[in-house]
Image (cartoon, rainbow, N blue to C red):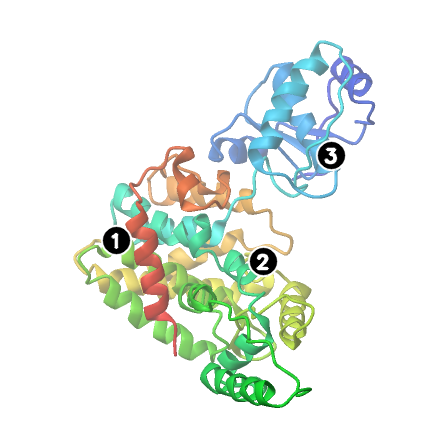
Amino acid sequence: MPAHGAHLPAALRDRLERSFGADLSEVRVHRCGAARRIAEDLGTIACAVDGAILLGADVPAAVLAHEVVHLLQARLPGAAPVAAAEAEARHLAARALAGLPCRVAVPADAAQPLRWEEAGHYYTVYYVALACGMSNDDAMRIAFWAQFPDEVSELDAVKAGFAMPLTGPAALAQWAGSGFGIPDALEDMYVEVNNGIAGLYGGYGRIAPPVRVDTSQFQVNLDVQRGLHCLTGANWTVETNRRTQISLGAARREDHYFEFGLSLHAYGDSFAHRNHDSGHMYASILGHGPETKFTQIAGDEISRMAGAQHPDELSTPRRREFEGCVTGMHALFRTAYPNLTPRESAGDAAAALATVIVDEPVASVQIATIRGLASRRLRTSMHSYRPERHEDVPFDDFFDEPKPVAATRHHVNEGLRLARLWNPR
């Protein structure tokens, strides 16, 4: 946004500064065409981002006060759930306008207009499906399933990564074939023989039977990371080619929108999770326990992933991958659904979506741009569902807020089955 903007109205600024005990002199209000377009594409009349308030129309003081709360939340360290930030903003805006003292306590992300929005899966798949000639409803359904692994904790790569440790060095060593640790049966036999000897000869040291950890959940989490999110460590060309064939096969299944959509999440990750240093995919996060050497491996991997750019972020270093993903996904749709009449070629779709790639991306602005592109170029208004406004939750809590597609526990179980099937052994 332009750096100039306008100050808050003087009388309102004085009142809010007294209530919040904060300096609001650097807050800028933007009413320009770009601000209005972003707000309209976000489906809102105002939003707060990067120390500025973007207005889509003339708004009352209550709206400005609400957005000021968001800006003050962004000054706090950390980032709380969206619902908590919104609830506090509504409450404190009313108090401040009444002249009452207010204390902002809920932190929010400074780079996000109200909420963090994911552009790379849901909205990219949605746009490409529309560009290939799918109806708005069908395009949204496929995009919904493409986003599903990041919305439900049971299928989420990060949650799986944090759940995988605590299995102990022996269990991990057996899985990794690292050379330390012995098979369960051999260890049991050794303990039995040793303790048998100890029973015959006084003073001979006994060995406590090993405490076995059920590694089945470890394997489930590993399947999620590798099967659904491409954290395989494989050559990235091999990985993307394999995911292409999986998606084409999924499109022929009976419940094809679900399986095809889920496969497109993995297809996108075969670009997003590429390690530029190695020519390979990032590897699974094996553990976080300080007692294992796997912690060091995982820590180094995380550091590399976070060093230059977040791998899931649509930023300049990922431009080539993103354009390749869009072009390849367009070809997937055209092959899977050959009877559709495309609205836009692969090259045009990739060029249009590439306009969201910037050095310092703000995901919600990127999403607003994609929504605007669909409206202007494809003459389609995307559905109102916004997955970025919902937290990643266990499936039992998934429908606490309405969703446009009827997902069931069956779909979670099928997702886990497909993760196992798609995990390269």
Q: Is residue 33 visible?
A: no
Quarter placement of the N terminus: top right
Residue 76 at what x, y percent from top left?
Answer: 75, 38
Numbered disc 3: secondary structure:
loop
Q: How much space separates mark 1 and mark 2, taking CA atoms?
A: 29 Å
Foreground residue, 94 or 279? 94
* Nearer to the camera, 104 or 203: 203
Task: Name the amino acid type tagged 3.
Answer: His
The residue beneath circle 3 is 4
Could you say where residue 405 lies in the image, as x and y percent from the top left? 30, 41
Q: Is residue 54 above or below residue 245?
A: above
Disc 2 secondary structure class: loop
Residue drawn at (30%, 69%) of the image: 246
Does residue 352 appear to the left or right of 205 in the view shown? left
First in sequence, mark 3 or 1: give its number.
3
Q: Contact, CB < 8 Å: mark 3 with mark 1?
A: no
Q: For mark 1, what is the residue?
A: 257
Disc 2 target residue: 315
Crowding around mark 2 (Cα neighbors within 10 Å: few <14, some 14 to 19, many 20+) is many
Q: Which numbered disc, 2 or 3, marks the residue that appears first in the sequence?
A: 3
**Distance (Cα) linking label 2 and label 3:** 25 Å
Amino acid carrying label 2: it is: Ser
Mark 1 lies on a secondary structure that is: helix
Quarter placement of the C terminus: bottom left
Quarter occupied by residue 358: bottom right
Residue 240, disc? none
